[in-house]
Image: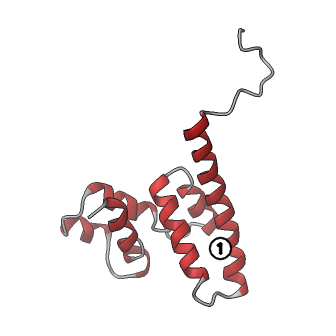
Amino acid sequence: MDIAVQIAWLHDTVEDGRCTLKDLIEGGFNTQVILGVSLLTRKLGQSYEDFIRRLEHDTVARGIKICDILSNLNDAPTARQIKRYSAALLVLVANETQSNVERDLGPAPDDSGASPTG
């Protein structure tokens, strides 16, 4: 099974369940899967904003979280949840868009005003 699919299936197990990362290790899951699940697990005392920012540079985690949020928005969210998820999507989708632009066109040119020849 694809690593991203395994991470997606398991991403709430540590945060919302009784499962620990140690349980996943003992269960024989791939190191990449365990690291992905760990990344998608909000740490005790961590703000939601910091949690989302932690995901913005990991393509797999970012994609899984975007799908997770869209699923949550389809499940009769409260006004507070809509506000929280909308803000998170803006961060995650902006990074997804930037990553795609850089992949397709290369990094943005230097805005420093220096001439390219030096």
**Residue 35 at what x, y percent from top left?**
36, 57
Q: Residue furthest front?
A: 104
Q: Badge 1: few (under 14), some or many (20 or more) residues near its Cα, within 10 Å?
A: many
Q: Quadrant of the N terminus?
A: bottom left
Does residue 113 appear left or right of residue 28 in this picture? right
Amino acid carrying mark 1 in the image: Tyr
**92 w.r.t. 71: above or below:** above
Q: Residue at x 77, y 17 (%)?
A: 114
Q: Residue at x 57, y 74 (%)?
A: 69
**26 w.r.t. 93: above or below:** below
Q: Quadrant of the C terminus?
A: top right
**Image mark count:** 1
Does residue 34 appear left or right of residue 110 in this picture? left
Q: Residue furthest bottom?
A: 76
Q: Nearer the viewer, residue 41 or 79?
A: 79
Indicate the quadrant where residue 106 lies. Answer: top right
Q: What is the image's colouring?
A: secondary structure
Q: Judging from the image, what secondary structure is the residue with disc 1 in? A: helix
Q: Nearer the viewer, residue 28 or 4?
A: 4
Residue carrying label 1: 85
**112 w.r.t. 35: above or below:** above
**Residue 74 at what x, y percent from top left?**
59, 84
Indicate the quadrant where residue 51 lies. Answer: bottom right
Does residue 81 appear left or right of residue 32 in this picture? right
**Residue 94 at what x, y percent from top left?**
66, 54
Does residue 34 appear left or right of residue 117 in this picture? left
Q: Residue at x 57, y 88 (%)?
A: 75
Q: Residue furthest top?
A: 118
**Residue 109 at what x, y percent from top left?**
70, 28
